[in-house]
Amino acid sequence: NAGVMQNPRHLVRRRGQEARLRCSPMKGHSHVYWYRQLPEEGLKFMVYLQKENIIDESGMPKERFSAEFPKEGPSILRIQQVVRGDSAAYFCASSLPGGRSTEAFFGQGTRLTVV
Amino acid sequence: GNSVTQMEGPVTLSEEAFLTINCTYTATGYPSLFWYVQYPGEGLQLLLKATKADDKGSNKGFEATYRKETTSFHLEKGSVQVSDSAVYFCALTYSSYKLIFGSGTRLLVRP
């Protein structure tokens, strides 16, 4: 049973380009979360999605960032016109529906470097 | 607001030493508390959790007790191994999502 799969593992983009990060949740999981980890910091919540719905995007920057979780296919975190400050590790997690003790399983992350 | 504070790292220990990583939290109500571990180049793995006051979470020799009176959830292990070298994150949540993480504590265990 594969875990949460993220790709690519490493992504290098020049300033102004677009970055697309993909996340396939664990089999049977309908809830997906994206977190960002800046160097030497903890993870910060960005967005929570269910299939075809954004439930909470309170942690997403207001501009340039968007996320989706379509009916078919992986969840996508999209960053337009990247800047150096977007360089970070982006982690996706997935879970079953449930209460606050429901475990979220994390992927290995995508490390974005903006040059 | 809700927050988690962890002791600064890195923590450097010799193999078989006793480990304590302090974690305190600020929150209203009764959050669930977690410890996650991140090995080099990997994602986070849930190490242990506690969902109510006085609960003790334990896994792989690690333990942490949910102390409401001191708002703490310190991680302990009686005898660390080189393979325990990693970054440890304390976290809390009120909901089924939106974990709030501490900044992490790097542990280095030397042979």
Image (cartoon, coloured by chain):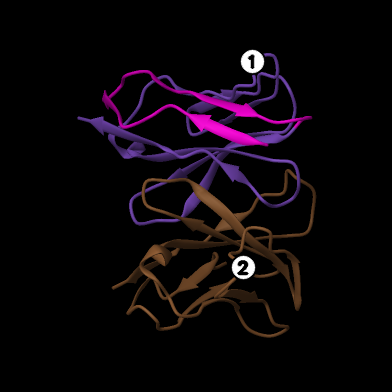
Chain colours: A brown, B purple
**A72 left or right of A65 in image:** right
- The residue sitting at the left extreme is B111
- Residue for badge 2: A62
- Residue for badge 1: B70
Which of the labelled discs sits on residue A110, or is there none?
A: none
Q: Which amino acid, mark 2?
A: Lys
User: Given the image, what chain letter belongs to the residue carrying mark 1?
Assistant: B
State which quarter of the image contains the C terminus of chain B: top left
* Residue B2 versus residue A26 in the image, above or below: above
**A21 left or right of A47 in image:** left
User: Number of marks in the image?
Assistant: 2
Q: Which amino acid, mark 1?
A: Thr
**B91 left or right of B76 in image:** right
Residue at the image point whose x is 54% and y is 75% from the top:
A64
Residue at the image point whose x is 69% and y is 82% from the top:
A70
Magenta range: B1-30
